[in-house]
């Protein structure tokens, strides 16, 4: 059996994992793929490290462009990351007629439309299972397993670093900065960890999933992105008291007038399975009209879990590459000429429930003033806590959970509440999803 030849660009965390798993499970993988998958060349700008990992078994170079131009290479695996050189290398590989496997969600969310169009034109495959939720086969599930369904919404814990931070802060009371350093040492974080903690990485992944779920282009620039850096521990505690957990969720939801695409800290009922996903684990909940709710769980980051997805893509390509391009699974689940230009809704138009925390004067009638404003705006209250003021304190906290409303309506009501003389400072507002 003639091996399929792979050029590996970047042998860091994921590249190293890919190299090792491919070697360890070589026989089993060959039995599945139908022919050996052989890494023939590794390109990494850190030559010494690349030589150490590969142990002299393959050709090592610091010139990734030479690899994408090498006529012997059938598949290029891009594990460098970022939008710069990675974009150039992927486009060059496609131009040279090579299939591409990438774990680079940033690249696909921002330049995916260009990359998939180029691949389509050239008749090559671009596979990216590792780009969303690492080892969980969520791309496969959305693209192939759920094709009978009109997918209504999906919501996922799709950033291991932030889920790890939230879990460790809640369980062990550890400070944010210390836990972030630990996540970096464990290889979960992006090279720029602000992408993790500010929600950008999760938004890249949600963007990719929204395209496959709804048959729309990548619209990362329209996604609403909020991270966990402004989250206060008081809200994590109050949420627990009300029976909720706070998770950084990536949400994509079909509405009559467009698609919601948003990442933000979200209260979810503690009794939901997904609320109990802890540490660096990921989980994605997908609601289809025929299948109902389905939940996908597993390791979303780290060397070997991510390598698992990279290699699954290599096997898929090995099996399919001799197939007529017309008969392959479409890159983005829908046939390329069937992608619909459905717009992502501005965040003001999103429909969700809210958690509101406000500091108020401990005076009669305060609660009545606040509930009147909410009633005027047609916002129902679902649950409430009013704290006793501390010893000698003239102020106290009120926490409310509301029913669903359009965000602009909630914002207008909150502005009126903040204008009340008995309300001190800003109202803390978090979104809440029941995920049903
Ligand atoms: N680490 C994870 O758990 C994880 C999970 C899923 C997806 N990803 C994605 O996988 C990709 C790789 O991530 P990683 O964590 O392995 O990163 P990494 O920083 O550990 O590895 C990147 C490697 O690329 C090399 N490199 C950088 N510029 C280069 C260039 N111009 N030419 C050749 N080599 C170059 C670096 O020397 C390094 O060895 C990123 O797109 C990341 O978002 C990572
Ligand atoms: N930085 C990412 C890696 C996996 O994509 C995370 O923490 O989930
Ligand atoms: Na995946």
Image (cartoon, rainbow, N blue to C red):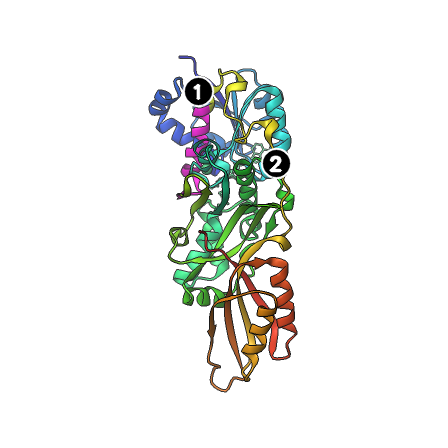
Considering only vertical position in the picture, is 373 above or below 334? below
Q: Which x, y percent locates residue 305? A: 41, 38
Give the CA separation, mark 2 to mark 1: 27 Å
Residue 319's disc is 1
Q: Report whether 322 appears left or right of 343.
A: left
Magenta highlight on residue 301: yes
Q: Nearer the viewer, mark 2 or mark 1?
A: 2
Q: Secondary structure at mark 2?
A: loop
Answer yes or no: is residue 63 visible. no
Residue at the spot 64% in from the left edge and 79% down from the top edge: 421
Q: Who comes first in sequence, dot 2 or dot 1?
A: 2
Considering only vertical position in the picture, is 390 above or below 411? below
Q: Which residues are magenta?
A: 296-316
Residue 9's disc is none
Magenta highlight on residue 28: no
Residue at which label 2 appears: 217
């Amino acid at each position: 059996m003639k091996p399929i030849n792979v050029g590996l660009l970047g042998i860091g965390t994921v590249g190293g994992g890919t190299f090792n798993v491919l070697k360890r499970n070589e026989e089993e993988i060959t039995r599945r793929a139908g022919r050996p998958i052989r890494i023939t060349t590794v390109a990494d700008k850190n030559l010494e490290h690349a030589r150490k990992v590969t142990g002299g078994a393959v050709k090592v170079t610091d010139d990734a462009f030479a690899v994408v131009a090498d006529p012997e290479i059938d598949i290029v695996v891009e594990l460098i990351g970022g939008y710069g050189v990675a974009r150039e290398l992927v486009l060059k590989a496609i131009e040279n007629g090579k299939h591409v496997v990438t774990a680079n969600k940033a690249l696909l969310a921002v330049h995916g439309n260009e990359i998939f169009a180029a691949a389509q034109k050239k008749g090559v495959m671009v596979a990216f299972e590792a780009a969303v939720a690492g080892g969980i086969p969520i791309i496969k599930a959305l693209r192939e397993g759920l094709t009978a369904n009109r997918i209504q919404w999906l919501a996922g814990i799709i950033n291991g670093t932030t889920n790890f931070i939230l879990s460790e802060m809640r369980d062990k009371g550890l400070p944010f900065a210390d836990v972030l350093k630990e996540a970096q040492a464990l290889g979960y974080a992006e090279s720029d960890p602000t992408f993790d903690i500010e929600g950008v990485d999760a938004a890249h992944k949600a963007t990719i999933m929204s395209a496959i779920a709804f048959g729309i282009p990548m619209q990362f620039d329209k996604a609403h992105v909020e991270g966990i850096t402004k989250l206060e521990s008081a809200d994590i505690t109050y949420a627990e008291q009300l029976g909720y957990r706070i998770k950084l969720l990536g949400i994509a939801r079909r509405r009559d007038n467009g698609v919601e695409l948003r990442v933000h800290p979200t209260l979810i009922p503690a009794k939901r399975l997904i609320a109990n996903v802890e540490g660096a684990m990921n989980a994605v909940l997908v609601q289809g009209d025929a299948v109902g709710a389905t939940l996908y769980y597993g390791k979303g980051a780290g060397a070997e879990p991510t390598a698992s997805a990279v290699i699954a893509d290599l096997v898929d390509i090995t099996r399919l590459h001799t197939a007529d391009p017309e008969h392959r699974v479409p890159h983005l689940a829908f046939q390329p000429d069937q992608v619909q230009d459905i717009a992502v809704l501005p965040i003001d138009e999103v429909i969700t429930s809210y958690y509101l925390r406000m500091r108020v004067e401990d005076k009669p009638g305060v609660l009545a003033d606040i509930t009147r404003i909410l009633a005027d705006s047609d916002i129902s209250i679902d649950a409430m806590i009013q704290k006793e003021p501390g010893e000698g304190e003239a102020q106290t906290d009120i926490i409310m959970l509301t029913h669903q409303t359009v965000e602009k309506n909630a914002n207008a009501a909150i502005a009126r509440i903040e204008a009340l003389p008995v309300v001190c400072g800003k109202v803390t507002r978090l979104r809440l999803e029941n995920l049903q």
